[in-house]
Amino acid sequence: MDTDAEEIKKRLAQAEQELQQMREGLALMGVKRCENCKRFYRSADAAALFDDGTEVVCYVCIHEWWPRRGGELEAKDRETTEHKLMRWLVAHHNAQLIPPSHKLPDEQAQEFRLAAECDQCEGTGTLLGGHCRYCGGAGTMWVVIPKSQAQ
Ligand SMILES: [Zn+2]
Ligand SMILES: [Zn+2]
C-alpha cells in the first residue's frame, strides 16, 4: 500500500519537473504567460502584455486585473504602476486621457475605461501654482480605450 503512495509521489514529482522544464523552454522561445487568464503570448509583442515588474498580464485582462492589482499595492507603488499602465495604454492601444470635466466618448465607442491619477500634477490638481491644465484641477483622468476598428 505504501509502495503505491510512493509510486504516485514519484510520478507527481516527475510531472512537476517536466512542467518546470516546459516553462523554461517557453521562456527561451520568447513566450510569456498572462497571470490572469494563463494564456501564452510572444514576449516580443509589446502591445499584448503589460509587465508591472511583478505580474505580467495581457491586454484582454487589464480591465479586470487592474482594480484587483491596484487594491493590493501600497499607495506609492500603485501610483508608479498606474502611470506605467497609462503610458502603456496610450502607446500601444491609442488610449485617450480625458479630464473628468470633459465629455466622454459614447459607451459604444469605448472598449473600456479606467480612472487614474493625473500623472502631470500627481493627483494634486495643482501644477506650477495654478489649476493643472491636464486634468482641469480634478487630480484624476479618465483613461479611455477606444474600440478598435479592426474588431
Ligand atoms: Zn490574460
Ligand atoms: Zn493634473
Image (cartoon, rainbow, N blue to C red):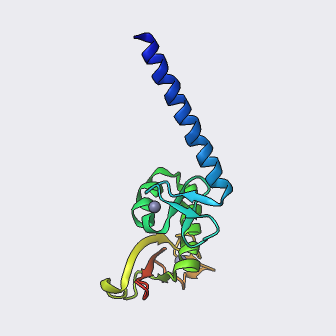
Which residue shows up at 61% across the image and 71% down it?
46
- Assign the N terminus to one quadrant of the image: top left
Q: Is residue 139 left or right of residue 43?
A: left
Q: Which of the two residues, 18 or 121, is positioned nearer the viewer here?
A: 18
Q: Compared to 63, does 56 lie above or below?
A: above
Which residue shows up at 49% across the image and 30% down it?
12
Residue 105 in the image, given as x and y percentages of width and height: 37, 88
Which residue shows up at 39% across the image and 84% down it?
101
Residue 5 in the image, given as x and y percentages of width and height: 43, 17
Residue 138 in the image, given as x and y percentages of width and height: 45, 77
Q: Is residue 65 left or right of residue 127?
A: left
Q: Which of the two residues, 126 or 121, is positioned nearer the viewer here?
A: 121
Q: Which of the two residues, 72 or 60, is positioned nearer the viewer here?
A: 60
- Assign the C terminus to one quadrant of the image: bottom left
Q: How many marks?
A: 0
Q: Which of the two residues, 4 or 135, is positioned nearer the viewer here?
A: 4
Q: Is residue 36 left or right of residue 78?
A: left
Q: Compared to 37, does 117 lie above or below?
A: below
Q: Compared to 19, does 120 lie above or below?
A: below
Q: Compared to 32, does 129 lie above or below?
A: below
Most distant residue in the top direction: 1
